[in-house]
Image (cartoon, rainbow, N blue to C red):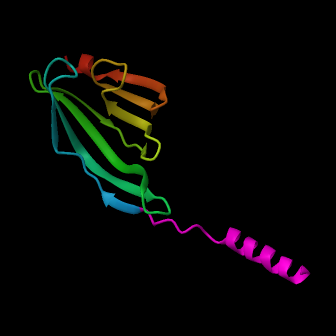
């Protein structure tokens, strides 16, 4: 009986120590479009281009093979241009960005640019933004700079 207990305990410990067999993450090139024409954020046309556009998406899966998280990394530079007066602003907005699929969360770290919830227009910002709010600072009102 004592020997059977040791075997059972040994099997439990062996099962506990075995790594979980989750699917390996996949990595894909994920460039943004060459041109986005934004007609609503500033109240006038803003051309959004990406002179450096080398982002990749890492997709993570659970044990059953279901997508649970996407992380976007790489070098991304944005240029906002007002074609009416040719004013432009260029900034490095490399992430990373994390999107939680299973729980519906979104988080961006570092510099970013574009529209933000609860802000009018387009902004450049630094810090942490996402589902939990904005923790960082806005460093440029893009619409005001291009007007």
Residue 76 position (above or below residue 115): below
Answer left or right for 82 relative to 132.
left
Name the residue furthest bottom: 3
Residue 108 position (above or below residue 27): above
Residue 105 sits in which quadrant?
A: top left
Looking at the image, which residue is at 12% across and 26% down? 86
- Return the x and y of residue 131 as percentages of the image width and height: 45, 32
Looking at the image, which residue is at 38% across and 63% down? 26
Front one among 96 and 81: 96
Magenta part, dominant SS? helix
Looking at the image, which residue is at 48% across and 59% down? 62
Name the quadrant of the C terminus. Answer: top left
Answer left or right for 109 relative to 39.
right
Extent of the magenta region = 1-25
- Return the x and y of residue 19 as percentages of the image width and height: 61, 69
- Return the x and y of residue 13 as percentages of the image width and height: 75, 71
Name the quadrant of the N terminus. Answer: bottom right
Front one among 37 and 13: 13
Residue 76 sits in which quadrant?
A: top left
Q: Is residue 11 magenta?
A: yes
């Amino acid at each position: 009986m004592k020997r059977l207990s040791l075997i059972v305990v040994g099997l439990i410990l062996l099962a506990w120590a075995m790594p979980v067999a989750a699917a390996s993450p996949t990595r894909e090139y994920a460039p943004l479009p060459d041109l986005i024409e934004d007609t609503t954020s500033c109240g006038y046309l803003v051309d959004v281009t990406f002179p450096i556009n080398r982002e990749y998406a890492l997709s993570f899966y659970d044990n059953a093979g279901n997508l649970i998280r996407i992380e976007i990394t790489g070098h991304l530079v944005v240029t906002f241009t007002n074609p009416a007066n040719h004013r432009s602003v260029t900034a490095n907005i490399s992430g990373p960005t994390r999107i939680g699929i299973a729980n519906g969360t979104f988080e961006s770290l570092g510099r970013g640019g574009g529209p933000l919830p609860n802000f009018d227009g387009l902004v450049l910002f630094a810090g942490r933004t996402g589902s939990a709010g904005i923790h960082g600072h806005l460093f440029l009102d893009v619409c005001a700079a291009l007007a």
